[in-house]
Image (cartoon, rainbow, N blue to C red):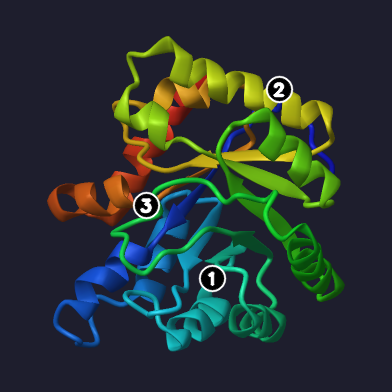
Amino acid sequence: MAASGGAAYLRLFINIDHVATLRQARHADEPDPAAAAVLCESAGADGITAHLREDRRHIQDADLDALARVTRTPLNLEMALTDEMLAIAERLRPHQVTLVPERRQEVTTEGGLDVTREPDRMAEGLARLAAAGIRTSLFIDPAPRMIDASAALHATAIELHTGQYAHAPANPATLAALRDGAAHACALGLAVHAGHGLTVRNVGPVAAIRDIQELNIGHSIISRAVFVGLEAAVREMRTAMEQERR
């Protein structure tokens, strides 16, 4: 899929990992991430994201099978570039795989993937995914060299890590990096997504970047759902995005 900068519609993918985090706190069978995904779709989500970590701290293999059965919107599988994960993706064949960095000691993903390291290994993994008919995305920091390397690797898309912006939204440099990175990526023919640390309070300026076509948001929506319900939380985020996108 070619990039189309300036798209009017901004897609919202909901990351449901934290539903599984709550379940795994008790090693029980509820809440069910697949049921959560269905509610997100009914509230207007354009897709569902799930990160299968190597240590299986939240999403489990069975969750992915259930998601593949019940979701009606595209499924985006976040994963590390390992032989195990590549084999799972080839079996499951989600709509998209987003390759992310992964360190077992981290609480959440703390930065973008360094796509300049082991370029041959990266290219091989992307080629395997593409051969299975899977759209590919790379979760990277909005740095020109990472964007250039992603294009050289023939990824379909990039997801810009918005963590620095989320930590310092009042710093104009953090938003400018996202805006410039998105424009640069679009010029290279990459589809542009973004995510990490986005909330209804800070999503507006990112949603206003017309070169960004998709946002992946999880923690803030699942947290808000504790108070207002999952469908209402999804709709609140959608409203916050669309107010700035018009």
The residue that mark 3 highlights is: 218
Tag of residue 71: 1
Q: Position of residue 17 (x, y in %)?
A: 36, 65
In front: 28, or 227?
28
Tag of residue 153: none
Helix, strand or loop at disc 2? helix
Q: Quadrant of residue 202?
A: top left
Quarter holding the C terminus is top right
Q: Position of residue 141 (x, y in %)?
A: 55, 38
Labels 2 and 1 touching (C-beta < 8 A): no
Q: Residue at x 45, y 21 (%)?
A: 174
| C-alpha span from label 2 to label 1 | 32 Å
User: Mark 1: which amino acid?
Assistant: Thr
Q: Residue at x 82, y 52 (%)?
A: 153
Q: Quadrant of residue 107?
A: bottom left
Asked if residue 240 shows in the view, the reply is no
Asked if residue 201 shows in the view, the reply is yes
Q: Earlier in the sequence, mark 3 or mark 2?
A: 2
Q: Position of residue 90 (x, y in %)?
A: 72, 81
Q: Position of residue 186 (x, y in %)?
A: 77, 29
Q: Earlier in the sequence, mark 1 or mark 3?
A: 1
Labels 3 and 2 touching (C-beta < 8 A): no
Q: Residue at x 56, y 68 (%)?
A: 80
In front: 155, or 6?
155
User: Mark 2: which amino acid?
Assistant: Ala
Q: Residue at x 43, y 82 (%)?
A: 63
Q: Earlier in the sequence, mark 2 or mark 1?
A: 1
Tag of residue 183: 2
| C-alpha span from label 3 to label 2 | 25 Å
